Amino acid sequence: MSTKESKPNLSHDQVTEIVKQLFGLTTSTIHPLPSYDDQNIYVASSEGGEYVLKVMNSVDSQNFTLLELQTHAMNFLHQRGLPAQTALPNLNGQLLSLEEIDCGYGMQKYLVRLLTYLPGTTIAKITSSPEILYEVGKMAATLDKVLLQMEHPNISALQRENFRWNLGSIPLLNQYIHVMDGDPVQKIVKGVMEQYQAQVVPKLTLFRKCINHGDLNDHNLLVEPIGPSRYKISGILDFGDMSCGYLIFELAIAIMYMMIENSNPIDVGRPVVAGWESVFPLNDAEKDALYLLVLGRFCQSLVLARHAVIQQPENTEYLMTTAKTGVHHLCRLWELGKEEVERIWFQSVAQL
């Protein structure tokens, strides 16, 4: 099944019907929200609530255990004071339900959840100060710290072998690297992959293990103003890329995505690292790998986005949102080199 055929595409009427049927709510406003593989729909009800109806793609919908675990993690974090979305029970008391829906490719089964709608604006839409970047680093570390306490009978489902968005899966890019044939940036991507294999893989046993959110990007973190040019983090979205990994993976992912819309992208690492280290000081192996891990995430974003565009050409603008800007940051980081970037990120942290 192609990616296009697995991605849900419920009509306005189908959304209205499923919200009424499953949750007993009458929709007053519906509009689409961005999504990579699934369908996210903003729903306001006549009864007064605001929600996000999340319909998983038909491929991921087959893994009920993993999705149930992600839903549990969201509620777990929320109960411990982190601003994560939570799933609301349907009329049968279930947080997830598997529904047969025809989105134009015949009847397929999609997992459906109704999530809380969190206030705020995405970090992508604000000018990120060192203060809010520090809070991003601190929040990323705090999230991983809380998830270390989570217990669940199916927690082993997060051992997602060959999950292509895990930072341990950089070698899997070999399967997709052909989408960059003819692009001079392919040489940099191959160089990053070679250095990852030589310099990061041997150090994996020295990294501290954890459960990663895995996608703390500038569209998955919401902020609210708390004064002139000051913000607080008000929402953590999209737990679809959760997997077992390492603390340093979460930090690298956060740094990479905070660079995307920043006017001084190379400087972003410094406050994010400082915020992270206020919770988890880095060990030597983690610190040494951070540069290549950030570059590795840029490579994943670039290569996998181009691959996805082949599958979903009608969704090109959204799929290439990060990669379009990220390619320039990847080239700049590669040009500066590890020593210079580390000097900027680490030697000036004490000045914050």
Image (tube, helix red, strand yellow):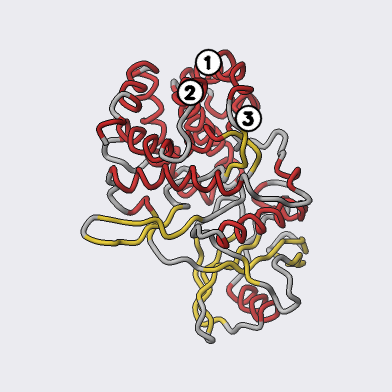
At 50% from the left and 57% from the top, the residue drawn is 82
The count of marks equals 3
Secondary structure found at label 3? helix
Q: Which mark is residue 195?
A: 1
Tell me which numbered mark, 3 or 1, is placed earlier along the sequence: 3
Q: Position of residue 240 (x, y in %)?
A: 61, 50
Observer-nearest of 351 and 307: 351
In the current view of this chain or complex, which residue is farthest to the top?
Answer: 198
Tell me which numbered mark, 2 or 1, is placed earlier along the sequence: 1
Q: Are marks 3 and 1 in contact (CB under 8 Å)?
A: no
Within-10-Å neighbours for mark 2: few <14, some 14–19, many 20+: many
Q: Which mark is residue 173?
A: none
Q: Amino acid at mark 2?
A: Leu
At 44% from the left and 52% from the top, the residue drawn is 219
Q: Position of residue 99 (x, y in %)?
A: 75, 67
Q: Is 209 placed above or below 56 here?
A: above
Within-10-Å neighbours for mark 1: few <14, some 14–19, many 20+: few
Residue position for label 3: 169
Secondary structure found at label 2? helix
Residue 285 shows in the view = yes
Residue position for label 2: 292
Tell me which numbered mark, 3 or 2, is placed earlier along the sequence: 3
Q: Are marks 3 and 2 in contact (CB under 8 Å)?
A: no
Q: Are marks 2 and 1 in contact (CB under 8 Å)?
A: yes
Q: Is 217 placed above or below 291 here?
A: below
Observer-nearest of 37 and 206: 206
At 39% from the left and 63% from the top, the residue drawn is 120
What's the CA distance linking mark 3 and mark 2?
A: 13 Å
Q: Amino acid at mark 1?
A: Gln
In the rendered view, does 48 fall on the left or right side of 153?
left
Q: Is 145 placed above or below 170 here?
A: below
